[in-house]
Amino acid sequence: MKVDHRVFGSIIKRRIRVKRRAPRFRARMLLGLVGALVGLSGCGMTGSPGSTDQADANGPITLDFWNGFTGPDGKTMEAMVKQFHAANPDITIRMQIIPWGTYYDKVTLALAYGGAPDVFILHAARLSEYASFNVLRPIDDLREAKGTGAPLPVADFARVPWKATFYKGKQYGLPLDVHPLGLYYNRALFKAAGITDANGNAKPPTNWDEFLAAAKKLTRDTNGDGRPDEWGFVFTNQHSNWYTFATQFGAGIVTEDGRRCAMDTPANLVALNRMRDLIYRYHVTPKPEGIDAWLAFRQGKVGMVMEGIYMLASLEEQKGLPYAGAPAPQFGPNPGVWGGSHVLCQPVGGSPRRVTAAWRFIRFLSDHSLTWAKGGQVPVRLSILHSAEFQALPVQSQFAKQVGFVRYDPTIPRGNALGQFVDPAVEAVLIGLQTPKAAMNDACRRITQALERP
Amino acid sequence: MTASAKAISRRGEFRRGEGVIGLLFALPHLVFFTLFLLAPTFYGFWISLHRWPILAKAHPFVGAANYAAALSDDIFWIALRNTAYFVLLVVPAGNLVSLLLALAISGVRRFFTFYKVAFYLPVIISIAVVAVLWRWLYNTEIGLLNLYLAAAVNGLRSLGLPLPPFEPVPWLSNPAFTMPSIALMSIWWGAGGNMVLYLAGINNIPDDYYEAATLDGANGWQRFWAITWPLLRPTTLFCLVFSVLGAFQIFGQTYVLFAPGSGPARSGLTLALYMYLQGFNQYEMGYGAAIAYLMFAIVLAFTLLQFRLLARPADDAASSRKRRTA
């Protein structure tokens, strides 16, 4: 830290004598240096790979495609891109897989400041947020397919995911899949507990009574320490599990019109009390605190879980686990499950040539979504859903039975901003910190504030 | 001293030249400092006065509305409370650990450097790595900490002690445990840094004092209270000030462990994490920037307070010297 001033002083003095002779040159050098630095930092911001057109209007074209498929689904997507390359030698897809945790940051910044990819994935529940800022290109004109082959077979798309791609009357993307929550159950534990049909096969529950009875039979203390070590049911993802309960009782995060909070409704309190009862009244579910619930199911210590179809790959990895899939039981008066969709979107401002090429790629992915389904997804094309090949996929075909009543998270522009109030409230109820009433009142106070903000 | 005095006497001769040359020396740093720290800092303040969703083309000026919103946002106050709790947990305990480590190894003759390096080593690990590591240690079911505790409890029980059966500690999943767990991990991570400062402070105390005290028959404890502790005071204050500043800005731990959530029942939500979530998760830059500036104001207030505390030791030393001579 200490500087020897004598040494430095003499250096400075010596340098001064030399430098004093050319003051102008010095000033110009300074300016040049600053200019160069500003230029350097500036070009990083405006450079957008792939967004400029190649000179040759009919030559090969390279498109950027961003998604968050970091798991086995990424491998499936890679295979589909290869297929596309083989069929479309004039287009090269440059795919970038970004973990979902940072994916939206990157997409948002690219859409705001330039460098957006030609094709990218958005979840259906977040589409309206981006559409409301006018950064997505509507695809209504592309559906009619001027010069891109056959028009899009609109009637071939399942209604719920199709509708979720619209915002204020315009369509902003093509749904690639729908990934509903469903019931995974352990066939061996079911058989051991005697929950079987007439043929002796494990019989998944379809309603609350069956579910509760099965959970009670499956919860066992095998080592005699007075505490269960095999559980009937566990909460893995609290959000999707609660949303499924809530939607079946007619509740949700916001009302149908998206204007008011719906979490403090009597319907939701009934739903939450059901969930609480599993833990504190019937003791068939462990308190969701410090347990890796999904791991416990994979290890064969849990009879049932409700998770998304995308967790299938994780089960396929587990050697010797006798799992099976079924639609989620209907706990309340209405059918309904939480679900999401990957939607293929384009940014605004692409040249006609890029837009057309990107649309060809999007169409290809949609037309070939059977490959995608095999990787652990439910397709949205009815022709594929009804095909024998898809029906032969044991878990996917079971989960697909719910496509008609999948419920997305609020598809309003501020929907995603509400999550920060929803999930802690549900958690507070499940770990017993707050009563359902108090927790939901807190959530609604905050949600109302967020909705009313200008 | 003499050089600068000379410089002053010859000021007229090269004041102009020295100014430019000095600027040239400072320029590389100054340019980067301005471009990447000063300008963004002021730009951040500008942003905090606007409604600034990242994707919007227009950002309307809203004055102090973001600040008012933050102050009436109960989650902001939860974040502030959690942060203050963390500071209270980590600063006194952390400094105590650092001081004890320094005292312990300052007396070591063999392998002194080994111990110093060993205790300092965690400091150079990135906080992201530390957090991932400790997440496994803290795992309720298969974490090392709970395994050891279970083994200890079961061992004592088998010896006939009337202990209840071991219940796994929910280190990171029970709101009451979250902050203490994070504090423990942070102390492990950072104790080595202050330890080095305390070591330097201890080494600066002349051996004569100890010799004299020993001759007077003072035992180890007395030597510590009468010599080491008072003479370490400047070091202690310095360490405390910078620990408080560092602790207030806690981010990496909670970010790695909980983001985009904020821990069970928001127990891991700190100010910096809340600022980050608003800015980069909700993309509400204006609101995030306002939280950042409120945090800045709080830290600044603490810094000023502590600078006044820091200014005191000189007077104290003088007054105590007076007392001794009197």
Image (cartoon, coloured by chain):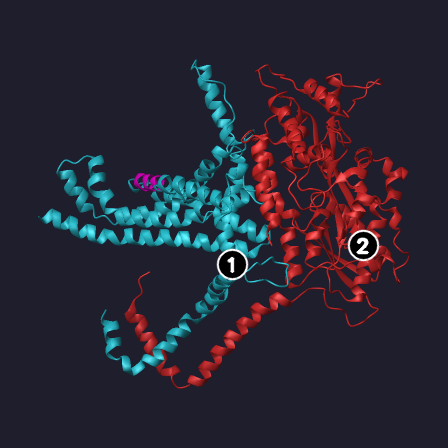
Chain colours: A red, B cyan
Whole-percent x and y of residue B97? 36, 39
Whole-percent x and y of residue A35? 53, 75
Residue extent of the magenta highlight? B96-104
Alpha carbons under labels 1 and 2: distance apart: 40 Å
Identify which residue is drawn at 34% across, 43% down. Answer: B112
Disc 1: which residue: B48
Q: Is residue A54 above or below residue A198?
A: below
Q: Which mark is residue B228?
A: none
Indicate which label's residue lies in the foreground, 1 or 2: 1
Circle 1 residues within 10 Å: few <14, some 14–19, many ≥20 = many
Mark 2, secondary structure of its residue: helix
Mark 1, secondary structure of its residue: helix
At label 2, which amino acid type do we have? Ile
Identify which residue is drawn at 86% across, 36% down. Answer: A391
At label 1, which amino acid type do we have? Ser
Q: Main secondary structure of the magenta part?
A: helix
Q: Chain of mark 2?
A: A
Image-quadrant location for residue A195: top right
Which quarter of the rendering shows the N terminus of chain A? Answer: bottom left
Whole-percent x and y of residue B293? 46, 56
Image-quadrant location for residue B12: bottom left
Q: Is residue B203 visible?
A: no
Identify which residue is drawn at 24% across, 51% down. Answer: B313
Disc 2: which residue: A362
Let me know if residue B132 is in the magenta part. Answer: no
Left or right: A406 in relation to A292: right
Q: Chain of mark 1?
A: B
Q: Is residue A77 visible?
A: yes
Circle 2 residues within 10 Å: few <14, some 14–19, many ≥20 = many
Whole-percent x and y of residue B122? 44, 44
